[in-house]
C-alpha cells in the first residue's frame, strides 16, 4: 500500500501562490513551477535538478529516453512522491488528475462506474458524479457504452474512458504518462485530436510524457527534451501553432521541421549517455 | 458467439465426461464379472453397489447429512478465518512476515498426528471433526486471498493514493473486489478438501452423532466386509465434495461472471 504522502513539498510558496492563482472555473488556470527539483532512490539518481514553468492552461510535453525520470517527474508533480531537493510550486487547493499508459480501470465496474471513480474518491456527491461522468463520457464518444465492462472495450475506448474519468473531476492540472503509447496509430491520431479538444475546452494545465516526438509537437505549447539517465532537461522548444490545430498541421513544413529539431535533440541526449 | 456454437460447446461439456463415465462403469462391470467374479468382496459390480444403495438408502442419506454439516461448518469457519487472516496480513508487512510462515505450517502439519490433541481438547465428537475439516481447508483460502489482495496494479494503487483514498477505501474499492477471483479459486479448492477433512476427522475421531457420518459408516461397512455398501458410501462422499465444489463455482460465477474470465 502506498503511504499517503502529504503534499508538504508544495510548500510555503504554494500557500502564497494559492492566493494569487485562483482555481479554474473561478477564473484563471493553475500554473506549475518546479525549481531545482531532483530525485534519488537510495543510490540511484532518477532525476537531476530540473527547472520548469508550466503556464496556467498551457500544454507541456516531455520527451526523453526510457528510464530518464519522466514518470518520476510526473509523480512528484502529482504529490505521490516527495522530491529529494528543490521545490514544487502549485496552489494548495489545485486538483490534479493522472492518466496512465495502461488505462488502469477497475474491471469489475462498468464504464459509468469507472468514470465516477476518482470523483468518488474525492467525495463528490453521487448525483453530481453521475451527471459529470455522463458528460465526460459523451465528450470522448463513449455515450451508449455506460453499461459495458472494460473487457468489452477496445484499447482506444479504454483510454477514452481513462481520459473521461480524469476530466470528469474537472482537474486544474492533468498529468499524462505515455497515455497513447499502447494504442494503434490510427486511434492515436484520433485520440490526440480529442485530447487537444478536451484540454482546450477545459483550460486544464497539462503535462504529457511521450516517446513520440510528433505527438509532443502536435499537442504541446512547449516541448522539453530530457537526456538519458540521470535525466535532466537538455532542450526546450516553443511550439508556435496556437490553439486551433487540425490534422493537416502534421504535414506542414513548419511542423515537420520542428519535429525534426526535437528528434535531433533527443538523439543528442542519447549519445551523451 | 452464435447460439449454435454455444450449444455445441455445452453439449461437448456434458457429452465428453458422460462418455468417460459410461466407459468407466462398463470397464468396472466387465472386471466384476470376469477377474473378480469369485471375489465380489474385493470388487462388487455396479449392480450390487446400486442394490446396497437402495437397501441402506436411509442410513447413507443420514450419514451424508451428518458429514455435510461437519464439512460445511469446517468450511465456513475456514472461510471466515482464512479471509480475515489474509486481510490482516495484507495490511501489514510485519503481520504478513510474522504469521505467513505459520499459515504454511498449518498446511504441512500432519492432521493425523494432531488429531489426538484435538480430541484431548475438544472431545470425541462433532466439534473436533469440524476443526479437522477447517484445518485442512484453511490454507488454500488464506493463500489465494492474500495473493489476490496483493495483486492490485501499481497504477491503480497510485491513483487511489493521489486522490487521498485511505487504507480502508483502497481495501474496499480496490483490493478486496480485485481479490474476489482469487478468493473464489481458493474456496473452490477448499470445497472438496473440507469434505475430505470431515471424513478423515471421522476416521480419526468418530462422530458425535450416534450413527455417525460417512467416515464412520465407511469404517463400519469395512468391518462387516460389506464392500458394496462401502462403495455406495464412497460414491456419496465423492458427490458430496463435488456438489460443494459446484455450489461454490456457481456462487463465484454469480459474483464475478460479468467481468472475470475464469468464471465464464
Ligand atoms: N520507486 C523507485 N525505486 C527505485 N528506483 C526507481 C523507482 N522509481 C523509478 N526508479 C528508477 O528511476 C529511474 C527513472 O525512472 P522513471 O521515472 O520511471 O523513468 P521513465 O519514466 O523516464 O522511463 C529509473 O532508473 C528507475 O529504475
Ligand atoms: Mg515512465
Image: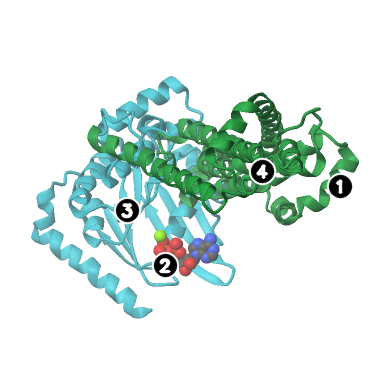
| Spatial CA span between label 3 and label 1 | 72 Å
Task: Say whether residue A175 is left or right of residue A218.
Answer: right
Query: Quadrant location of the C terminus of chain B?
Result: top left
Q: Looking at the rendered structure, which numbered label has been put on residue B196?
A: 4
Would you name the residue on which mark 3 appears? A60
Task: Say whether residue B242 is left or right of residue A169.
Answer: right
Please state the horizontal and vertical placement of residue A82, each as a whole percent of the image: 55, 55
Residue at figure coordinates x 59%, y 43% from the top left: B44
Chain of the residue displaying label 2: A
| Spatial CA span between label 4 and label 3 | 63 Å
Chain A colour in the picture: cyan
Q: Are marks 3 and 1 in contact (CB under 8 Å)?
A: no
Query: Quick check: is the Cβ at mark 1 less than 8 Å away from ligand 1?
Result: no
Query: Quick check: is the Cβ at mark 3 less than 8 Å away from ligand 1?
Result: no
Chain of the residue displaying label 4: B
| Spatial CA span between label 2 and label 4 | 52 Å
Residue at figure coordinates x 72%, y 39% from the top left: B221
Q: For the residue labelled by badge 2, is the local secondary structure a helix, a strand or a loop? A: loop
Chain of the residue displaying label 1: B
Would you name the residue on which mark 1 appears? B116
Q: Are marks 1 and 4 in contact (CB under 8 Å)?
A: no
Would you name the residue on which mark 2 appears? A67
Please state the horizontal and vertical placement of residue A118, each as a whole percent of the image: 45, 36
Chain B colour in the picture: green
Amino acid at each position: 500500500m502506498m503511504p499517503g504522502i502529504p503534499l508538504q513539498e508544495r510548500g510555503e510558496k504554494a500557500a502564497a501562490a494559492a492566493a494569487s492563482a485562483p482555481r479554474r472555473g473561478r477564473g484563471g488556470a493553475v500554473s506549475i513551477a518546479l525549481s531545482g527539483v531532483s530525485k534519488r532512490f537510495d543510490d540511484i539518481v532518477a532525476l537531476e535538478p530540473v527547472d520548469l514553468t508550466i503556464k496556467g492552461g498551457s500544454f507541456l510535453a516531455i520527451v526523453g529516453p526510457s528510464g530518464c525520470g519522466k514518470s518520476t517527474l510526473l509523480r512528484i508533480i502529482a504529490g505521490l512522491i516527495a522530491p529529494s531537493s528543490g521545490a514544487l510550486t502549485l496552489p494548495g487547493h489545485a486538483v490534479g488528475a493522472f492518466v496512465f499508459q495502461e488505462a488502469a480501470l477497475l474491471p469489475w465496474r462498468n464504464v459509468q462506474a469507472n468514470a465516477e471513480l476518482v470523483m468518488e474518491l474525492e467525495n463528490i456527491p453521487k448525483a453530481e458524479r453521475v451527471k459529470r461522468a455522463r458528460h465526460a463520457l459523451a465528450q470522448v464518444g463513449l455515450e451508449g457504452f455506460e453499461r459495458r465492462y472494460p473487457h468489452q472495450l477496445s484499447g482506444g475506448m479504454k483510454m477514452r474512458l481513462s481520459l473521461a474519468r480524469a476530466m470528469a473531476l474537472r482537474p486544474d492540472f492533468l498529468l499524462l504518462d505515455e497515455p497513447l503509447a499502447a494504442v494503434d496509430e490510427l486511434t492515436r491520431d484520433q485520440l490526440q485530436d480529442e485530447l487537444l479538444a478536451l484540454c482546450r475546452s477545459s483550460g486544464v494545465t497539462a503535462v504529457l510524457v511521450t516517446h513520440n516526438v510528433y505527438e509532443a509537437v502536435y499537442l504541446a505549447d512547449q516541448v522539453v527534451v530530457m537526456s538519458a539517465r540521470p535525466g535532466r532537461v537538455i532542450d526546450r522548444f516553443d511550439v508556435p501553432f496556437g490553439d486551433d490545430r487540425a490534422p493537416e498541421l502534421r504535414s506542414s513544413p513548419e511542423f515537420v521541421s520542428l519535429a525534426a529539431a526535437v528528434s535531433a535533440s533527443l538523439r543528442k541526449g542519447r549519445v551523451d549517455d | 458467439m452464435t447460439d449454435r456454437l454455444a450449444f455445441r460447446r455445452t453439449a461437448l461439456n456434458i457429452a465428453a465426461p458422460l462418455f468417460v463415465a459410461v466407459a468407466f462403469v462398463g470397464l468396472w462391470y466387465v472386471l466384476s464379472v470376469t477377474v473378480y467374479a469369485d471375489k465380489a468382496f474385493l470388487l462388487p459390480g455396479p449392480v450390487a453397489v446400486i442394490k446396497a444403495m437402495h437397501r441402506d438408502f436411509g442410513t447413507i442419506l443420514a450419514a451424508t447429512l451428518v458429514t455435510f454439516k461437519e464439512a460445511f461448518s469446517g468450511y465456513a469457519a475456514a472461510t471466515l478465518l482464512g479471509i480475515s487472516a489474509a486481510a490482516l496480513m495484507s495490511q501489514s508487512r510485519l503481520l504478513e512476515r510474522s504469521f505467513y510462515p505459520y499459515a504454511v505450517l498449518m498446511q504441512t502439519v500432519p492432521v493425523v498426528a494432531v488429531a489426538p490433541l484435538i480430541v484431548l481438547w475438544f472431545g470425541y465428537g462433532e466439534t473436533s471433526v469440524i476443526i479437522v475439516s477447517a484445518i485442512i481447508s484453511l490454507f488454500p483460502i488464506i493463500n489465494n486471498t492474500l495473493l489476490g489482495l496483493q495483486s492490485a496494479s501499481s497504477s491503480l494503487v497510485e491513483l487511489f493514493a493521489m486522490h487521498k483514498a485511505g487504507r480502508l477505501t483502497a481495501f474496499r474499492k480496490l483490493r478486496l473486489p480485485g481479490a474476489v477471483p482469487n478468493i473464489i479459486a481458493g474456496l473452490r479448492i477448499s470445497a472438496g478438501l473440507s469434505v475430505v477433512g470431515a471424513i478423515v476427522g471421522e476416521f480419526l475421531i468418530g462422530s458425535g452423532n450416534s450413527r455417525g457420518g460417512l467416515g464412520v459408516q465407511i469404517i463400519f461397512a469395512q468391518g462387516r466386509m460389506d464392500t458394496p455398501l462401502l462403495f455406495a458410501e464412497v460414491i456419496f462422499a465423492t458427490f458430496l465434495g463435488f456438489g460443494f465444489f459446484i455450489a461454490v463455482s456457481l456462487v463465484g460465477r454469480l459474483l464475478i461472471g460479468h467481468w472475470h474470465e475464469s468464471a465464464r
